[in-house]
Amino acid sequence: MIYREAGQFKTTYASDQQLFPILQDRVFVIGFLVFAFGVMPFIGTEYLFRAILVPFLILSLAALGLNILVGYCGQVSLGTGGFMAIGAYAAYNLAVRVPDLNLIVIFLLAGACSTVVGALFGIPSLRIKGFYLAVATLAAQFFIDWMFARIKWFTHDSPSGNVSAPPLQVFGFPIESPEAKYLFVLAFVCVFALVARNLARGAIGRAWMATRDMDVAAEVIGIRPMAAKLSAFAVSSFFVGVAGALWAFVYLGSWEPLAFDVNRSFQLLFMIIIGGLGSILGSFLGAAFIVVLPLVLNQVPGWLGVHMSTATVSHVEAMVFGALIVFFLIVEPRGLARLWAIGKEKLRLWPFPH
Amino acid sequence: MNAATSRNLTIAFFVLLTFGALAPMAFGSARFPQWLEVVIGGLMSGVLYALVAIGLVLIFKASGVFNFAQGAMVLFAALTLVRVMEKLPFALALVVTLAAMVALAWLVERLVLRPLVNQEPIVLFMATLGVAYFIDGFGQLVWGSDIYTLDIGMPKEPKILLEGTFEGGILVSTEDVIAAVMAGLLVAVLALFFQKTGTGRALRAVADDHQAAQSIGIPLNRIWVIVWSVAGLVALVSGVIWGSKLGVQFSLQLIALKALPVVILGGFTSMPGAIIGGLIIGLGEKVSEVYLGPYLGGGIENWFAYVLALIFLLFRPEGLFGERHIDRV
Amino acid sequence: MKQLLKSKAAALAIAAAGVFGIAAETAAQSSNEIFMPVLVYRTGAYAPNGIPWADGYVDYIKLVNERDGGVNGIKLAFEECEFGYATDRGVECYERFKSKKPVLINPLSTGVTFALTDKVPTDKVVLFSTGYGRADSADGSVFAWNFPLLGTYWSAADMLVQHVKSKGPLKGKKIALVYHDSPYGKEPIKLLEERAKVEGFQLILLPVTHPGVEQKATWLQVRQQRPDYVFLWGWGVMNSTSIKDAIAVSYPRLQMYGVWWSSAEPDVTPAETASKGYNGIALGHSSEKGLPVHADMVKFLYDKGKGTAKGKDEVGSVLYNRGMISAMLSIEAIKAAQGKYGKRVVTGEEVRWGAEHINLDAAKIKALGFGEIVQPIKTSCRDHEGVRRGRIHTWDGKAWSYTSDWLEADNKFVRPLVEASAKAYAAEKKITPRDCSKEG
């Protein structure tokens, strides 16, 4: 009834190819953005920003990056944490060594560093496939972890190996309050989501998807596998690197390599699989799910009035988390984004399904 | 064994040999005994990595699942054993634990594998990650997260060999030797099981071709339960060996990460590959840590194993003994 | 099909609950309570050591509430947050606690301490790091909010060097540091390097990667290099593994010295009698039971089934004691603040003043029921460490016993390093150090 596209005719190529061809989608997205930018900063609590929204947004950016690689190009990577670390430490070094650089420039350059490293570790993908590649990307993960723990230059000779971000400010505005951090991160994520969406539906995105579906066939029809795979690694690492820099600077403020260990890689992989491979929306849904789930699970015993020790809670949390993952994979292996799409299909016909 | 495999075996053997032969030349023969200790220690670690890798390969061959939960299974088996041993004698505890592992295998087949049949490999892999979380939480919830001592009477003090020949002698950890013998026995038993019993043959048939096996009446589901149970048994043996070395604690499950480079080096589908791969990785990482580590600041063995595997993969993308697959459009 | 749809609907419902069911704040804190956040790790690779410390810490808070009815009549509220000794999760816990207005936090993680050091001055939360944390934060003029009470790692390393020096000159000797590859394990390196220059010993650095179950190569290196002493800076499951691997290469346990986090019961019991002869520097206290405070614990908590630990055997173990002492110092800081500002719910800034004016002499410590397990401690604006004394204790196969006289870190040697490092920190962060002569 509400969500009906009948009567919306596409009379030009431009209208057929636009970002959101359906009017309701446009209205919804714009309304959502207005809410996120205009209303949320005034109604959110400090807890909501600090513990939920900021980590959610940054991790969705990282998940988005990983989704480009895994979901669109079909190259499974377990080294995402490492690439986040590259972004974080590159940003740190830039901030410390070039003090007057604009923060946004720092983050973009950090992404660029991550791009280079990502493309480098993407080279084996030309020869190695499937799980062999996935495990091989762990080489990147462990090597990068080690590198930042061991090579003192990267941590500016910090004796403990722990580094901390300088005070954040953009064009003279300090980014200290939770609201400012939220808006800053939100702006980044929105721009990057737009970029990702456009990349994915352009020529390069189609090349990625062809490679994902069958790389030999893609090669036969004239897609250069090297260009497709390496560009996916590069773009993905760029996103992930920026997310890493944001995670370190805006969220943690102070960190050591273990903040980007292999568990982070697994966590991000969970996000895109639960959210939906090859879906921009899925990256966000998955990130939201994985960020919020532990917080909710933590509160459940309290709501039920059961007293459990901290240890019990975290064991039960691990169990429920594991079980939910399996449950979701069984119910909808294509993720939350797919559930969303099904819901939209239903809504299209509602309330007259015939 | 076909020609390709035997050729690969020869390659692997020579790689091992040259790797071994070159190292002492670089450091002078005066330090030969020390080098020998490192090599022996590396090979012994390799045996244990191989053991976990065998569990991975078993499951991958039979059901196409890359089972990340193998590490969690090791922990769960060891935890169950050590806590049941507090109440029951060792032999009985072993039986109880084995029963628990079979029950686990059955549950995994019923609740995870069967509903996920025909899904993408990555989805199955993720599901085993979920299983790993579950087992991890469940095991610690039921059995606790302290360090438990698993004492099966392994001697702790090392033996010093050839003390007359070399200054200081060559140190060999008796514990490692016993562990290696246990691992060897297990592999022999598994080999017999696969070669001589009907079930074993059925397993091999499934590993070769699921559909063909099904069409001649091999029940896939039951085979899966059996394979996961066997993997559970392998996990139990690894858990006993590692647990008696390190104490039974949460970190045991992290040895799954040690087994990953082993399986990609040896090939996901090959048991001999897992063994040879384990030895190469064990040897490579210990030698690199002791001889290369000091120049690089130490702590390199973690990534070195992966980089070593990666380099091998660049030459043989399916691992040393993996099945070469041909892409067709 | 219907069933599938149903389960899809269930999935959708769960997802919706997950995404939108954002936890409403359970307002545990009322206006007449002081909130004490407790960062714990009761799971994971560090749980064997994290559990007894957390039990001691929480038990003492409970005891003060039960026995004394709170601090000067103000009840203490506390809440645990599990972070598994992962720095980023610890920071998350801290951020989550912030809306409950904590006044003082003691994270039991050097990594988290480093991470929070930049955050606490703006948030007005006092950061205790009792026996851990960053060594340079002993300089209170720069690190106004950090309190590495009872002794830093530089003090620990200094005392260890003094002790082994007392067995014979160190010139030409080799000391290996086997350390957890994290801010915690790296902390003593600076001081040991300086000491190596002065004393003329060779320092061998052997890092062990988290979580520390893979140490074979490390100990093979120890066997090759044959150091005269091994200092162990491990935590969690790494400690017991180190001792086991030392046994596996026949390294004499008598020549091994652990820092105070590497010499507690969970570290030696897995190797049982084989770890006999293993030494550690005790942070003023070892495993000691039977003090008045322990009796109170049993009487007010364990006999009523309110204890945190699994059984009352744990009461009085090394790490339990340390947790208890850490909580006691926090509460003494609150008491000191109340002494100046009034017996009410004090703020973070007031507690900071209190922490800077902790002054417990032997008699006061005894009156608190702690016997001699805490050394007299006095903090000031200049000195946030308070005391830097320790003893060597040795594991005899069944229990710890003291095997040395009191040692004291040489402040003439350590302090200049602390000040230099603090100064560098102040320059990097653009902090103007306080003038301690003007602080009351």
Image (cartoon, rainbow, N blue to C red):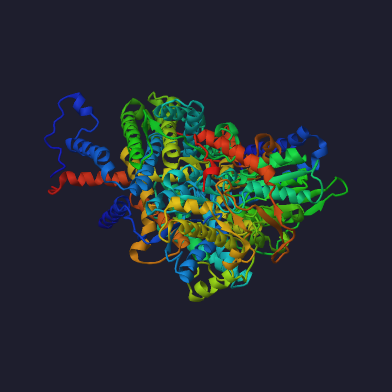
Q: Is residue C163 visible?
A: yes
Q: Position of residue C175 (x, y in %)?
A: 74, 45
Please say if C121 is above or below C255.
above
Q: Position of residue C333 (x, y in %)?
A: 51, 57
Q: Is residue C358 left or right of residue A247?
A: right
- The quarter holding residue A177 reads top left
User: For this rendering, which residue is in front, B40 or B186?
Assistant: B40
Instruction: Please provide percent x and percent y for residue A345.
Output: 21, 44
Q: Residue at x 66, y 50 (%)?
A: C156
Q: Is residue A64 left or right of residue A140?
A: left
Q: Is residue A72 above or below residue C406?
A: above
Query: Relative to C156, is A138 on the left or the right?
Result: left
The quadrant in which residue B3 appears is top right
- Furthest toward the right, the residue is B164
* Label tally: 0
Is C65 drawn above or below residue A75 in the view shown?
Answer: below
Which is more toward the observer, A290 or A50? A50
Q: Quadrant of the N terminus of chain A?
A: top left
* Residue A158 percent across, percent down from the top left: 57, 36
- The structure residue drawn at horizontal position 79% and vertical position 44%, both measured from the top left corner, is C170
Q: Quadrant of residue A59?
A: top left
Residue B115 visible here: no
Image position of A214 with respect to C276: above or below: above
Viewer-side residue, A58 vs B311: A58
Residue drawn at x 80%, y 40% as measured from the top left: B32
Camera-side residue: B314 or B192?
Answer: B314
